[in-house]
Amino acid sequence: MSTDHMNIDIHTYQVPSRLLDSKKCPKPHIDAIEKYKQLYEESIKDPQTFWGRFAKELLHWHKPFETVLTGSGFEYGDVAWFREGELNASYNCVDRHALVNPKKTAIIYEADEPGNSRHITYEELLRDVCRLAITLKELGIKKGDTVAIYMPMVPEAVVAFLACARLGAVHSVVFAGFSSDALRDRIQDASSRLVITSDEGMRGGKTISTKKIVDDAVKDCPTIEHVLVFRRTGSDVPFSAPRDLWWHEEIEKHRPYCPPEIVNAEDPLFLLYTSGSTGKPKGVLHTTAGYLLGAAITFKYVFDYHENDIYGCMADIGWITGHTYIIYGPLLNGGTTVLFESTPVYPTPSRYWEVVAKHKITQFYTAPTAIRLLRRYGNDYVKGHDLSSLRIIGSVGEPINPEAWEWYYEVVGRKECTVVDTYWQTETGSIIITPLPGATATKPGSATFPFFGIDPVILDPTTGEEIKGNNAEGVLAVRQPWPSMARTVYKNHHRYLDTYLKPFKGYYFTGDGAGRDNDGYYWIRGRVDDVINVSGHRLSTAEIESALILHHAVAEAAVIGVADELTGQCVHAFATLKPNEEKTDVKDLILQVRKVIGPFAAPRKIYIVNDLPKTRSGKIMRRILRKIVSGEADQLGDLSTINNPSIIPVLIEKVKSS
Ligand code: ATP
Ligand code: MG
């Protein structure tokens, strides 16, 4: 994996002048790279002072902490932050803002059907959270209990998160697109006592039988005592009292105030299972104060949050991005967050841009999969919508191909917005490598520099030695603990140690390959499991896929390594094409890779397909393609997270016949 053979012409983009013009935009919190460097240096050299200061500034403590960081670093996974401190997450997200700014909009709900939106103020949110918190308390939920949330993207889902947090109960949110089996496994693993769900869900004009899925799942979950059902569509759904209870009937019984349960800084806040791109999902556990601090500080600086902003993250609350950047980050800062129930293409591929124009969104955050999809549809769907409110546009979830980055920057951002390519993981809790919009010159495809307090290193994958200086290639690890890092894998601390702390002693290991270029910019190359080794050249999937996408006909690409007697491995590629490009010659695509990277990276085979296997959060699942090509389609492993299982037989057929 090295950049020296890359011929992609990468430009550097300075901070758009509009962002620094006080007549047009609020002054960025960090408006020069020197200011970033200064704060960054302090955060690494003196983390105790740095994090102690921000913990006091950004959070409300019911009892102050005395120590900032304790524990053995990365040896035993016993790190603790702010250990004497006591606080409550829902108080921090809601009460303190409702007290000073009750009429401010906390949530803008944009429903699946266009034209249906609703504003919820901080005082309304507080009443709703309190009513539900008392309801849960009456049902016996107390501090430390786990509650499963399987909800569509409605404001009540946010209320459910915060009501659990108010009681010190641990929420375990499961994306409401998961099957009943996947939900069952997660409820069982977490021993959840209650599920909060809805009668049905609505997405892209389609109805989802949410409650039915829950019924199937809980059949085999003896720990579940109640299922609390929010009425989203009002359709008739199976209902079995006394286990099942209607949300609207229960909350009416209670007064809309419930005192918050004050918890210790290190008490758990939530559990969340990873996307499952590489294997069986892990139940990642986050604790209260450190996670909240990470969410609050990154939201403020990465999205350069200001008082009157309208912030919109298009992720689902079922993913870490939804947790940290739809709910906790914005609400901790007293911001206004958009909750989007629909899809980027419903009813047309203009939906995102209609929503931006309608609500005058200032920060917009989505994933490369959506950006590539909308680029495939073409610019006409973007044109004609007033996107002038935007200042910052973000990307998260996978490496973003430079070609898709440029499209996002030019067509959506009109060259007037900073693109923040934010790198992080469920386990990191909050963004760890990212540009700061008012300070960092960006390069398409690079997540640029570490966030405050993050000390990244590139390690040699075989020796584990740090590769110092610029022009480094290897695997990405972190040298110092940071507040929002996951504390354990639920009831499986061994797996936590084995996955993150043991592979390279003294470091947190991300599992991703990365490079640091001549200017010190970080480039995420993709997962270490996906790295391809051709005649001793370590090639990154992201690099070859980006070369393919540079071809005008290609919409998306996935590459894998396949065993080869001569070269160790050779490259196979899967590609989807843009509309009306069916006549594309695969030889052209191979040539494209030869030209951009070099002959050794040229795919031995290219399969043109209609769709790629993806997780439900939209990430390409290369491990499935690897199995299919190597003739092991009967051993595909954990498939609970795949979004489009019906394409598997199609892919198997395609590979067989070519
Ligand atoms: P699993 O760990 O179960 O295989 P997952 O890693 O996909 O699933 P997440 O925690 O949702 O689960 O995703 C984190 C991963 O997503 C990162 O490790 C990285 O591979 C990828 N990623 C996220 N953001 C970026 C980004 N900006 N650039 C490159 N890769 C990214
Ligand atoms: Mg992962």
Image (spheres, helix red, strand yellow):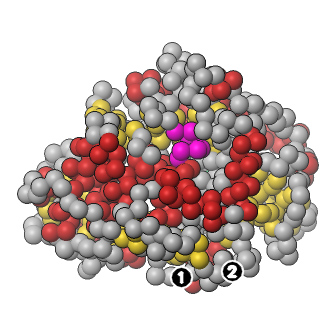
Q: In this view, does 190 lie to the left or right of 280?
A: left
Residue linked to disc 1:
493
Q: Mark 2 or mark 1: which comes first in sequence?
A: 1
Left or right, 60 with reference to 252 = right
Image height check: is 270 above or below 339?
below
Q: From the image, which quarter does the N terminus lie in?
A: bottom right
Report helix, strand or loop for mark 1: helix
Vertically, is 87 above or below 363? below
Q: Residue 654 in the image: x percent, y percent?
A: 63, 51
Residue where numbered disc 2 is placed: 502
Q: Is mark 1 within 8 Å of ligand 1?
A: no
10 Å crowding of disc 1: few (<14), some (14-19), many (20+): some
Camera-nearest residue between 284 and 300: 300
Secondary-structure class at tag 2: loop
Q: Which residue is drawn at 14% across and 62% down?
A: 245
- Up-down relation of residue 297 to residue 534 (above or below): above
Q: Nearer the viewer, residue 150 or 482?
A: 482
In this view of the protein, which residue sits in the foreground, 160 or 300?
300
- Badge 2: residue crowd in 10 Å (few <14, some 14–19, many ≥20): some
Residues in magenta?
299-305
Question: Residue 270: horizontal and vertical position, in percent?
Answer: 41, 66
User: Is residue 431 part of the magenta span, yes or no?
Assistant: no
Could you tell me the amino acid type at mark 1?
His
Looking at the rendered structure, which numbered label has been put on residue 293? none
> In this rendering, is residue 384 above or below 172?
above
| Res 450 visible | no
Asked which quadrant contains residue 335, the reply is top left
Furthest residue in direction top, as rendered:
384
Q: Is residue 230 at least partly visible in the picture?
A: yes
Q: Which amino acid does label 2 sit on?
A: Lys
Q: Which residue is drawn at 69% across and 50% down?
A: 39
